[in-house]
Amino acid sequence: MARPTTWREAWDWLLGRDEPPPPDPDRTVEAAWLPSWQGRMITDELVADGIPAVVVDDYNINLTMYSREPMARIFVTEDRRAEAEDVIEEILGHPPRRRML
């Protein structure tokens, strides 16, 4: 690493943090968390666009302030996440959200 130029870079240099690794095509990540009725529709669009995607129903017995209906999660490979988020945003009209754990 070159000489740090910002406080954050200096802090990372002191703690020995490395650059984040490149996206791994073998790793699965969450692309979106949305109502179940939208999950299947958007997953079909992602697959039609050549982005491998899987939808999983996210059932929760406890109603929270985040959702009042059955929700679904869409998972894609880590290297295609940005593409998937662009397609999802194009369909929904707003950026996809993820559930805070």
Image (cartoon, rainbow, N blue to C red):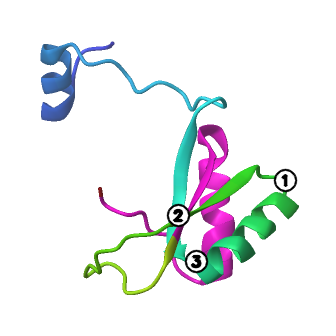
Q: CA distance from mark 3 to mark 1?
A: 22 Å
Q: Which residues are magenta?
A: 72-100
- Check residue 94 for magenta coloring: yes
Examine the image and state in which quarter residue 85 appears.
bottom right
Question: Which of the image's four quarters has the N terminus?
Answer: top left
Q: Which residue is mark 2?
A: 32
- Report if residue 95 is visible in the image: no
- In the image shown, does 11 or 26 lie closer to the viewer? 26
**Image spot of residue 27 (x, y percent):** 58, 33
**Type of amino acid under label 3:** Ser
Other-residue count near label 1 (Cα within 10 Å), few / some / many at <14 / 14–19 / ≥20: few
Examine the image and state in which quarter residue 23 appears.
top right
Q: Which residue is mark 3?
A: 36
The residue positioned 71% from the left and 72% from the top of the image is 40
Reply above or below: 71 against 9: below
- Report if residue 48 is visible in the image: yes
- In the image shown, does 64 or 75 lie closer to the viewer? 64
Q: Which numbered tag is attached to residue 50?
A: 1
- The number of numbered badges drawn on the structure is 3
- Check residue 79 for magenta coloring: yes
User: Which secondary structure lies at badge 1?
Assistant: loop
The residue positioned 69% from the left and 67% from the top of the image is 87
The residue positioned 31% from the left and 14% from the top of the image is 2
- In the image shown, does 56 or 11 lie closer to the viewer? 56
Question: Which of the image's four quarters has the C terminus?
Answer: bottom left
